[in-house]
Amino acid sequence: MSQEYIVLVAGPMGAGKTTAIAALSEIPVVRTEARNTDLARHSKALTTVALDYGEITLSGHDKVRLYGVPGQDRFDFMWKILERRALGLMLLLDNAAPDPIGDLDRYLKVFADLDQRGAMVIGVTRTDVNPQPDTETYNERLRESGRVLPVFALDAREPRQVCTLLGTLVALVEARATTVV
Amino acid sequence: MNDDPHLRQACQQQIETLVQQTLGVVSASVVSGDGFEVASLLRDDISGDKLAAMASSLLALSEAVVQELRMNSCRNIIIESDRGHVVALRIPASEHELLLCVLCNDSASLGAVLFAARSTAQDIGLGLEQRADA
């Protein structure tokens, strides 16, 4: 029987959320981008100010609705609004950012609710630009905080890689659904 | 752009005029497209930063809806609440991405507020064009 899932894609500015959703989506992605005036924070030209919306049908005919949130803190009201709908979280972290491990800590805390009732996977982007921290460092940090979560290094532009991350998340969501009575 | 004091001052003056001259308008704000406050005149209990972010989200989302429904372009958004209205629209200024957000209470005529908001937005836009040409 085919299922429908809602997945949240979150993470700091520039991690590749909009890119990842575009790589996955079968429909033209609904975007809400504005010209970035916070060039000190990130040099990119455009930034998401409300949400990205995309859809993908997985091989088992399961449909996934993807919601991407803006990266900046000042849009955290959007995180809260969209978190409620989601069954799983794809957290994307930018390995070339000043403090990716700090970002990990912050997002685990922010999305603690979703983490508890749903599933989470972590995708680390731009490891070609900056190979450190490596996956093991992320895993160690997660272990320290009592968590075991899949961590993948990936290129957010590559559909197959993002799909692998999504597939892992969906599998975790399904596993949760069967264990929780 | 956010560091342009002349821009801020020009917007501030326009907002003050709008609030003073339009019955029922209690607060107004000029905001960048990506949610930063440029100028504002706000009631004490309003967080300008939060309002700026929310206004930019609302407008962008509304425009996405209008585009999806193929209804051409979004002219403005209007939120009707128990205690008045919130109006937000884009400022026509090619160089900058700016929005105007206006809050009014029950004593306001919505039509008058829309008219005043559009005029203010147009005036700000014209002022920016003139400065750009100068």
Image: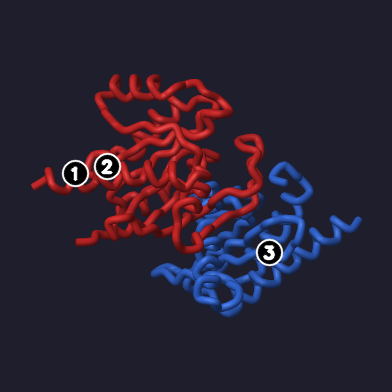
Chain colours: A red, B blue
The percent position of residue B7, horizontal first and vertical second, equals 76, 51
The vertical placement of A177 against B67, above or below, is: above
Question: Quick check: do tags 3 and 2 share a chain?
Answer: no
Would you say A160 lies left or right of A147 here?
A: right
Counting residues from the start of the chain, the first of labels 2 and 1 encountered is 2
Query: Which numbered disc covers residue B91?
Result: 3
Residue drawn at x 55%, y 52% is: B52
Residue drawn at x 74%, y 62% is: B93
The residue carrying mark 1 is A175
The percent position of residue A164, horizontal first and vertical second, equals 37, 43
Classify residue A130 by image quadrant. top right
Q: Please report, as a chain letter, where disc 1 is located.
A: A
Q: Secondary structure at mark 2?
A: strand
Residue drawn at x 27%, y 56% is: A60
The vertical placement of B31 against B73, above or below, is: above
Would you say B19 lies left or right of A2 here?
A: right
Whole-angstrom CA distance, mark 2 to mark 1, is 9 Å
The residue carrying mark 2 is A119
Front in this rendered view, residue A132 or A161: A161
Front in this rendered view, residue B46 or A90: A90
Would you say B30 lies left or right of B95 here?
A: left
The crowd level at tag 2 (other Cα within 10 Å; few <14, some 14-19, many 20+) is many
Whole-angstrom CA distance, mark 1 to mark 3, is 50 Å
Question: Mark 1 is on which residue type?
Answer: Ala
Q: Secondary structure at mark 1?
A: helix
Classify residue B99 by image quadrant. bottom right
Question: Mark 2 is on which residue type?
Answer: Ala
